[in-house]
Amino acid sequence: MLLARSGNTIRRAAIAARPAAGVRFFSMGVSKAEIDHFGSHVFKGTVADEYLTAVGLPSGTLNSPDWTMSPDSADKVAKAVLNWAVDNGATSFCHWFQPMASSGVRHGLSGQVQNAFFKFDSDNKAVWDLKGKDLLAGETDGSSYPNGGLRATHTAGGYLKVDPTSHIWLREDTIFIPSCFVSYYGYALDEKTPLLRSVDALNREGKRLLSTLGWDVPGLQTNIGLEQEIFLIPREFYNQRMDLQLTGRTVIGKDAPRGQEMCDHYMAPPSTTTPALACMAEIQRQCFQLGIPLRTRHREVAPNQYEFAPLFGSVTTQIDQNVIVMQIIEEVAAQFGLAALLQEKPFNNVNGSGKHNNWSVATTDGINLLNVNQVTQASGNDSMFATIMAAIVSGVDKHGDLMRAAIASPGNDFRLGACEAPPAIVSTYLGDDMTTYLEGFKNGSDAPYSPSIKDLSLGVECLGSLSVPAEDRNRTSPFPYGGHRFEFRAVGSSQNVSLVNTVLNTFTAEAFGIFADKIEGGASPKEVASEALNEHWKVIFNGDNYDEANQQMLTDRGVWRIDSGVDAICTLTSPKNVELFSKMKVLAPEECAARQTALIDHYVGTVEMEALCMIDMLNQHVIPAVKEAEGNTLSDLHAAVEKIKHGISAIHAEESEQKRGNVARHLRLETMVELRETVDQAEAETPASLWTLPTYRDLLFMDMTHGGQASGHGYFE
């Protein structure tokens, strides 16, 4: 009884400590001077050139990786970086890398060891020192990161190599050197190394295909734009929820009387009576300093849910920047009395959070291969676009299992298949115009693709007609074509999207290579593309992916459907996929196996943390409150604790990697979901004065509750 009373006292104190009604949170926003200094804390462009020319290097030295191959150039770049860093108040540097299996657990999703770039001489005077060798490479312990068995305590070496495709940046007193992380034998221990290999593969095979079609290009790269969804909740209540603190989601909690059923939150004006808008403006300000074009901010569908979105950029830069953004979001939120939740499904029965991965392929001189007008004009080949699309469609159909594996983050267990998140059936939406065009192409038509535009009348005399695309948005498709790009909508908000883009790049590279081989062997390009479209046409679906009849129809067609995230992860070691990654020189068989092990361990570990949180919350909060209220669910709650303990023991008893993962999945998605109903019913029947945990009403409705003062017993009585 004492525990229940003291817990409720803490909860009341949090309510009382909120700002009084009418308090306004002013956002300083971003000044013009700060906009004019966009990217001042990233070593690129004019910022870098000023320092590079001062040490005898030409402007644009960093535009090519050649400087990393010359010890003399590397020393000069290091000197320029040091001078820039010291001028901006930095005293330390680190190689910044991205370990595997970090989503939802590792702050910042990165690894680093910060070292001072000064030492003291015999007179105790600081001597500033950063050499080329310090910039180019580093060494650390590889066994203490998730590595899937590639490293052990007695074989622990891990090695870092600067990534010249991404830019050095500065935050606080430290410069960060984007790096790759590999083992003593060169196996990838990180997210970035396979990504860079996949970029090489796509460039290699794509240039070869385009050359067979009569178009020689300087190079190919993938560009992406990432939409980052989050929740912002009052930190005082976050601090009282063990499940949110340790796992990022609520494992128990009764729905509030109000949710998102009125569609009232989406794109509503951010309120100045809560800290959310000021927090988001500060996040943008810090990102602008780092050259991150975080252009868009708005409310999302669920209460207390928001989104940021940047401009498009190269895949390596955008992923690095997104990882940085996620760290800044969490840290700035705390400074404003908020907690940022990046997990995919923090709350039951409202929308989860995604990170829509908008993906395209372009030449290095700026021609977007998914833009029909640009491609046709640049290549002079009317069938070029259809050939490229046919290759991508074939890759989606052939390797939909890998696409599913790439999004098998623990949080997506609860998110996929509803509330604007697509199901786990990997089809692609092309729209009627594109589908009709490709159908005609494979059947022999030479008619060009001309996406139609329709004029929409608003029925108001003073308003002219509105030109809109003929194709609607299909938000139920996992991989819709959106005009000039594909949008991988199923990606989870907490993810590092390197594996996602590694998969897209790799199967596209393979498809380009297969097409090139056949054309070089004497087949006509149209014959090759048409054959691929006929073989893989089943993966194209423009309808409602939420409709169960459609889901069954797609399943019967043979479109990839893997409901279990665990089973999806285990396709990384299927013979088909090991061959794909090996052939494209992206992952060795040992690396495929290690990545699978690391991801299964990550999933199982996440489930175990959630289960242990549920046990503690039942024992420390729910059962004491129900006991004091003399509720009638006590025996059920005690039984629930034992059932969860039994489930954890069953996980530990299973030796098979895949079976262990699926035992954990059963505990999470069946046992704990069923037991949650009992707990949430207990919350509904327990007087608010005895309930010690912050409720969904506390957590989700900052607009309505933030700034309101509790008087007497407050509004929870």
Image: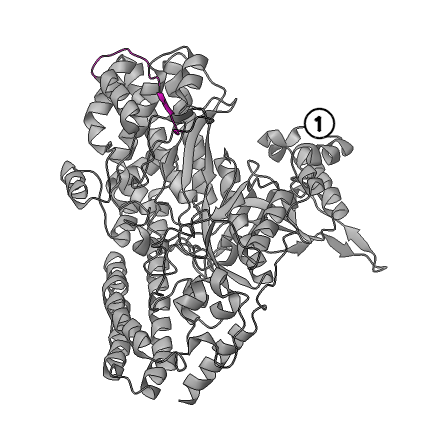
Q: Looking at the picture, does residue 574 appear above or below residue 429? A: below
107 or 299: nearer the viewer: 299
> Which colour scheme appears in the figure?
one colour
Report helix, strand or loop for mark 1.
loop
Note whether 416 is above or below 625 in the view shown: above
Can the viewer see residue 290? yes
Pointer 1: residues within 10 angstroms few (<14), some, or many (20+)? Answer: few
**Could you say which is closer to the camera, residue 548 or residue 226?**
548
The amino acid type of the residue labelled 1 equals Pro
Classified by dominant secondary structure, the portion drawn in magenta counts as loop
Question: In terms of depth relative to the viewer, which is nearer, 3 or 186?
Answer: 3
Q: Quadrant of the N terminus?
A: bottom left
Q: Which residue is mark 1?
A: 58
> Which span is picked out in magenta?
443-459
Tell me: residue 42, above or below residue 706: above
Outermost residue toward the left? 556
Closer to the camera, 373 or 537? Answer: 373
Q: Residue at x 39, y 18 (%)?
A: 210
Viewer can see residue 78: no
Q: Quadrant of residue 2?
A: bottom left
Indicate the position of residue 628 as horizontal and vertical percent values. Answer: 35, 88
The total of numbered circles placed on residues is: 1
Quarter holding the C terminus is bottom left
**Does residue 438 sit above or below 246 in this rendering?**
above
Relative side of 714 to 672, left or right? right
Q: Check if residue 172 falls in the magenta segment.
A: no
At which x and y percent is residue 330?
53, 57
